[in-house]
Image (tube, rainbow, N blue to C red):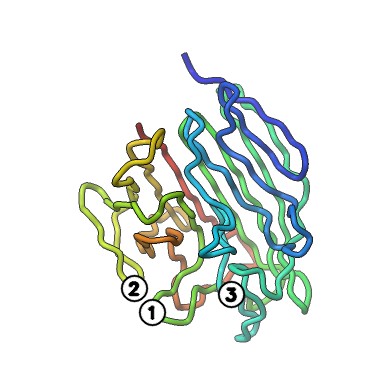
Amino acid sequence: MRQRLSTSVADGKVSVVCDELAVLTYHFVTADPSEPWRLNFIHPLAAANGACLTEDAPADHHHHRGVFWAWRRMIVDGEVVGDGWVGRDLAYRVEPPRVAVREDGDVEIMTDVVWSARMGALVRERAHIVVGPDRVELEVRLRALSENVMVAGTDDEKGYGGPSIRFAHSDRLQFESEGRALAPEVGAVETGGSVDFSWDPRPEGFPERVRVACSIDGRPWTKWVLRRGLSMQNCAFPGREPFAVPTGRDLAMRVSISILS
């Protein structure tokens, strides 16, 4: 029998519940006015048995926030104007999300966000989150609201920024892609179309593995910054080199997360 999903919206959060256990929460209002940027992210992401797979605001990297998408450099006319990763010099206006349970039983969360810096509104973001038992499909669409807006990772060999996951017990992680073991490097690692994350030793209640696939405008993105330590795992788009956010169409990023027992 298919597990039943239900939703609730309260206190700036959308919660998805599976058989009375919370499996996903999307935050659209910050819980701390001193951190106005701590919103528009997912935490917890949990297995169907309730085991929490993500962390928010860990002591080692306070700015990490579950499943999030942010860039170290927001660039306008060649000038860095903000850092969405740590919430510096950027503001986000998040509309109350639209939430529905579909006929197939999955839950949809649809969001609208405007990113602004000191010169005004820069980017409109529209996200579509589909939650099923042991599965999350996230699509984030970006469109620039002014000319010459770019996003980029860090300006160093790491080049990190973009869709990210802060897994719990990240110091126990093992990495594999399409049957090939992966080893973390300082910069991005070339992967296949998906990356499998597993834990050794596996924490009680945790799944066998979590499989994550990313794509940009329909093409697999195969550059990941991986960390076997207290850190995040990052689908490193676009990397060190800035990428122009289009004005006449959407830039579509997709992240598929499958929890495999």
The Cα atoms of the two marked residues, 3 and 1, are separated by 19 Å
- Please, what secondary structure does the residue beneath circle 1 have? loop
Give the left or right position of residue 208, taking residue 77 as reference.
left
Out of 209 and 229, give the one closest to the viewer. 229
Report the residue at 62% width, 74% height from top.
83
**Residue corresponding to mark 2:** 186
Report the residue at 73% width, 39% height from top.
98
Q: Residues within 10 Å of mark 3 (few under 14, many from 20)?
A: many
The Cα atoms of the two marked residues, 1 and 2, are separated by 7 Å
Q: Earlier in the sequence, mark 2 or mark 3?
A: 3
Report the residue at 49% width, 18% height from top.
2
Residue sitting at the far bottom: 78
Give the left or right position of residue 185, taking residue 258 as reference.
left
Q: Amino acid at mark 1?
A: Glu
Q: Earlier in the sequence, mark 3 or mark 1?
A: 3
**Discs 3/1, front:** 1
**Residue corresponding to mark 1:** 157
Q: Amino acid at mark 3?
A: Met
Q: Amino acid at mark 2?
A: Val
